[in-house]
Image (tube, rainbow, N blue to C red):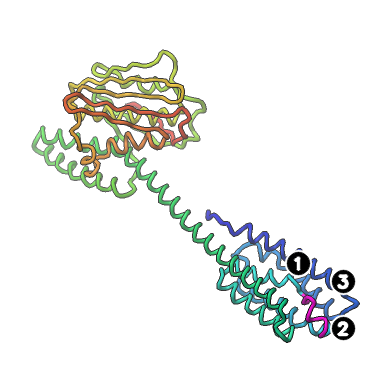
Amino acid sequence: MRMSVELPLWRALAGYRVLTLLYAIALCVTRYDLYVRPWAAVAYNAVLLVWTLATLPRVRGAASCTKRFLVADLAIALAGILLTPLADSHQRIAGGPTLPSIWTAGAVLAFAIKGGWRWAAVASTAVAAANLVERGHPARDTVHSLILVWVASIAIGYVVEVARASERTLARALEIEAATRERERLARDIHDGVLQVLAMVQRRGAVIGGEAAELGRLAGEQEVALRTLVSGGLVPVSRVSEDASAGAVVRVVEEPYEDEPDGPLDLRALLAPYAGARVSLAEPGAPVELSRPAARELAAAVGAALDNVRRHAGGEARAWILVEDEPEEIVVTVRDDGPGIPEGRLAQAEGEGRLGVAQSIRGRLRDLGGSAELISVPGQGTEVELKVPKGAPRARGKKAERR
């Protein structure tokens, strides 16, 4: 749905037309005895009354306010100006109002809101010409009034054009932001599952040899192609992550967050399955509660960190998970005793499309309003510190099924 700042302007224009109609009728009533031909003034105001009330739905928006209507509306205003000498004496015309009076400005403003300052300039120029013909000479008061209408209508038309351009820019920026966030989320899911499976098939195929080696080679090619796709555009949702320590496969099924039960979730319950012979878990004695989406995203980031330990530090590396429940945030630290990460390796991996840290860890924490800090010294292991505020925003829920 397209946003619009024009709607209040159209509503204000409708109100302006009604109020100025009442003003024109009041002028006709109070000046009735002064008109040379009062029947002409009464007839025109009757037409103006019917036209204004009948066309109120036309000024509800730009779609209903067509070009034909604008031309007809301006014609009604110009006709009233040019008919003023028929109803009033020449002596009174010089200092008195026209039959439509300030109702004419409403027709000009409709041009400004519909078509911008150029349309406003055309309409206000036509009104100025009609007024000069009606007066017979360019009196000072007449010129001042015409310049005021001309400048005001052009200014409003210009503001409308700027507002429309701003709307288009904002809408485009929101589309880009939404597409970027969706791409990052899907990239995390693919990294957690498909890419790791393809990498495993490539390694195992090379070890087994024979036809398995060819299968591994094809899996390696698909991994490179998929990493390129993840880095540059949207990909289908599919997440299958390998639990190397337990030999199990966890398939994550996307479901709308609205289907999630209400209430917080104890983070300890999600991190407990990660503990094993080579992974130690230290946690508080009391429940560590977070909203369900935030808890699951944080647990997934911990799982991604442990996957990196298994892949890069080796199957014999040990890891420690420390959970801290601070007053304002939850802090989870994942530390290992592996060889560490060489300086510049993370930037190189991200450039190659390997998005484990960039998307599966940092991306998840950024979406929750938190942060992920990685400290690694070659030869002394790696430490990943994950921080999530307790008021973390609601993300899409995910349901895990263990096979």
- Distance (Cα) linking label 1 and label 2: 23 Å
Q: Amino acid at mark 1?
A: Thr
Crowdedness of circle 2 by 10 Å Cα count: few (<14), some, many (20+)?
A: some
Q: Secondary structure at mark 3?
A: helix
Identify the residue shown where x is 58% and y is 67%.
157
The kind of secondary structure element at disc 1 is helix
Amino acid type assigned to the residue bearing label 2 in the image: Val
In terms of image quadrants, where is residue 280?
A: top left
Residue that extends furthest to the top in the rendered view of this protein: 285
Q: Position of residue 338 (x, y in %)?
A: 19, 24
Q: Residue at x 44, y 36 (%)?
A: 395
The secondary structure that most of the magenta stretch takes on is loop
Q: Compared with residue 176, is residue 35 higher up or lower down, i.e. above or below?
A: below
Residue located beneath label 3 in the image? 29
Percent position of residue 271, x then y: 35, 22
Give above or below for 273 relative to 392. Answer: above
To which residue does mark 1 refer?
A: 20
Residue 76 in view in this figure: no
Q: Report the residue that reaches farthest toward the right.
A: 33
Front one among 238 and 215: 238
Which of pointers 1 and 2 lies earlier in the amino acid sequence? Answer: 1
- Sequence-first disc among 2 and 3: 3
The span shown in magenta is 90-99
